[in-house]
Amino acid sequence: MTTHINFLDLSVYYGSHKAVDEVTMNIQKNEIFGIVGPANSGKTTLLKTINRTLDLITGTRTTGEVSIDGTNVRNIGNVNHLRRRIGMVFPLPVGLPLTVYENVAYAPRRAGIHDKETLDELVEQCLKQAVLWDEVKDRLDTLGTKLSGGQQQRLTLARALAHQPEILCLDEFSIAIDPVTTMKIEDILVQLKEKMTIVLVTNLTQQARRLAGHVAFLNASQLVEWGETEKMFSNPEKEITGRYLNGDFG
Amino acid sequence: MERRKVLVEGIAKKVMLVAALCLIVPVLAIIAYIFYKASPVLGLDYLWGVPEGGGTGGGIWPPLIGTFFLVLVSLCICAPIGIMAGIYLNEYAPDNWFTRIINMAVTSLAGVPSIVHALFGVGAFVLTFGMGESLLAASCTIAVMTIPVLITSTREALSAVPMAFRQACWNMGATKWQTIRTIVLPNSISGILTGVILEVSRAAGETAPILFTGAAASIPFMADSLGDKLMPYFLGDKFMALSYHLKVVADKLNDVPEAMKYGTAAVLIGLIFILNSFSIVLRMYLRSRKKW
Ligand SMILES: Nc1ncnc2c1ncn2[C@@H]1O[C@H](COP(=O)(O)OP(=O)(O)OP(=O)(O)O)[C@@H](O)[C@H]1O
Ligand SMILES: [Mg+2]
């Protein structure tokens, strides 16, 4: 096992508010890494440091470092190149105002893939991986914004997969998706991890338990602890971790 | 209690309806009056004809095509500048003191009276840049006057595209320009163009900005040459325009028949109405294509 993503003393400030407080942990290649924690604990912020979309918000400041394959993301000259290596799925489903097909083909096109056959194949494959293909295969030319909330959420997943990222970050991806479909997607995530590293932020601790090899627990901007999933659930070092993961928090 | 709410709602509706009528009735009344007064002269001969006897008779074609040219040339100058500046300020500009100064300048300039722009036009274009009193100088003046408003309307059209779309694109590694080109502009271009046409035609209907920068009371016109009629002014020429022509016939000449004066006004209103309906059609098209 080699380290893929490494957080070292990472802190993030929004103005004077510290949203991530000196987080140090590392994520292995080809694992599913779960991040859990109550609202406002800094989970989403942590994801945004990986592809540096945090830079797009004015008034943010980070100290410490995030590195991918040992390279500090700050030192990657072409930030768009960095972002193409990472797939991001955020909880707010946003279908772009383009057809379903063009939604999925968006990133590949920007990366210079224009061959129709290649695109067709890629679109079908990604929509299948997002468990959306059967529902939209006959209407690939409808607008992505006109799909249902749950469908749009899966569309964003397909879109994130379309640029064949080496890291896939999922932020509460199943929030608008029914349990049956969620289970199907979970099965696919297990297959996908053969090809990529998956960072899974979730409010469902049982989802993390089912899928993740390692889990990190964040609370009030701080990394309380992280480690192997089973140990975190059954025998955590901090008492608060056990209480949160087993559902009697608060 | 319920009944009272229904009653209040009903009254409120009626009051607002009356307010809306108050707005529309005078407008319709003015238009109807002008067209009624102009009706004796209105017709193809009038539109296509050339003024005779210093505006006391004949037609209105030279000022009509003059205003049309004015709109066209001003559009070519202010649309690219206004739109690009709007895109820069809305999509690229960092939030710092420099941007804030530009924003302040844009807002203040939009509030400057047109006669001030006109004097600036004389100083800058007619004199300093040596354009003389010409179609070009007048168009530049109209452009300067319109650009601040254009920037604002462009920014409004751009901000109507939800931020979440841009973020989604950035997350996929699209550059800012790719995002603008593929998502932001296609969904705001109709709104932007609507603003451009509205603003320019509004400005071209004004007298002040062309008063000292290139408008002429009358220009010798070869009545029968088609080429001369379709292309009467070049960029360096003085030109006739409807708004100025209206001023001339309305207050300088006592012996102009009333119908001629109202005719000029009617044609000016008509031209601006036609230009505006372009943008209304565009906007309807935009609504019908709304993608979210
Ligand atoms: N754009 C922003 N500007 C200012 N503060 C922000 C911004 N985004 C997040 N924050 C603050 O940072 C803190 C952490 O937010 P974050 O979104 O990372 O939490 P989270 O763990 O993802 O919460 P949730 O489970 O509700 O999604 C919060 O206190 C929030 O108010
Ligand atoms: Mg979050």
Image (tube, helix red, strand yellow):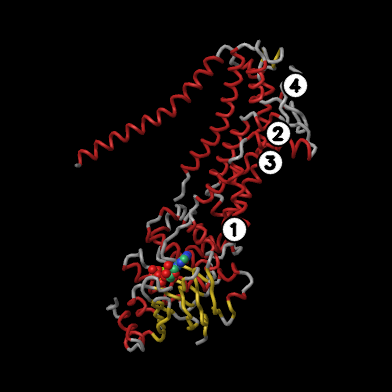
Kindly state the secondary structure of the residue where label 2 is placed: helix
Picture coordinates of residue A119, whole percent (x, y): 54, 62
Kindly state the secondary structure of the residue where label 4 is placed: loop
Q: Mark 2 = which residue?
A: B138
Q: Tell me if I can see residue B24 in this picture.
A: yes
Q: Tell me if I can see residue A170 in this picture.
A: no
Q: How many marks?
A: 4
Marks 2, 1 in one chain: yes
Sequence-wise, which precedes: disc 3 or disc 1?
3
Marks 3 and 2 in Cβ contact (< 8 Å): no
Q: Nearer the viewer, mark 2 or mark 1?
A: 2
Amino acid type, mark 4: Ile
Displayed quadrant of residue B131: top right
Q: Mark 3 = which residue?
A: B77
Sequence-wise, which precedes: disc 4 or disc 2?
2
Closer to us: A140 or A246 = A246
Sequence-wise, which precedes: disc 2 or disc 1?
2
Give me the C-alpha separation between circle 4 and circle 2. 16 Å
Say which residue appears at 29% left-offset and 76% top-offset: A250
Compared across the picture, whether B33 is left or right of B100 comes to: left
Sequence-wise, which precedes: disc 4 or disc 1?
1
Say which residue appears at 22% left-offset and 38% top-offset: B4
Compared across the picture, whether B170 is left or right of B208 comes to: left
Sequence-wise, which precedes: disc 3 or disc 2?
3
Q: Nearer the viewer, mark 4 or mark 1?
A: 4
Kindly state the secondary structure of the residue where label 1 is placed: helix
Q: Nearer the viewer, mark 4 or mark 2?
A: 2
Disc number for residue B178: 1
Q: Mark 4 = which residue?
A: B219
Dot 2 alpha-carbon crowd within 10 angstroms: few under 14, some 14 to 19, many 20 or more: many
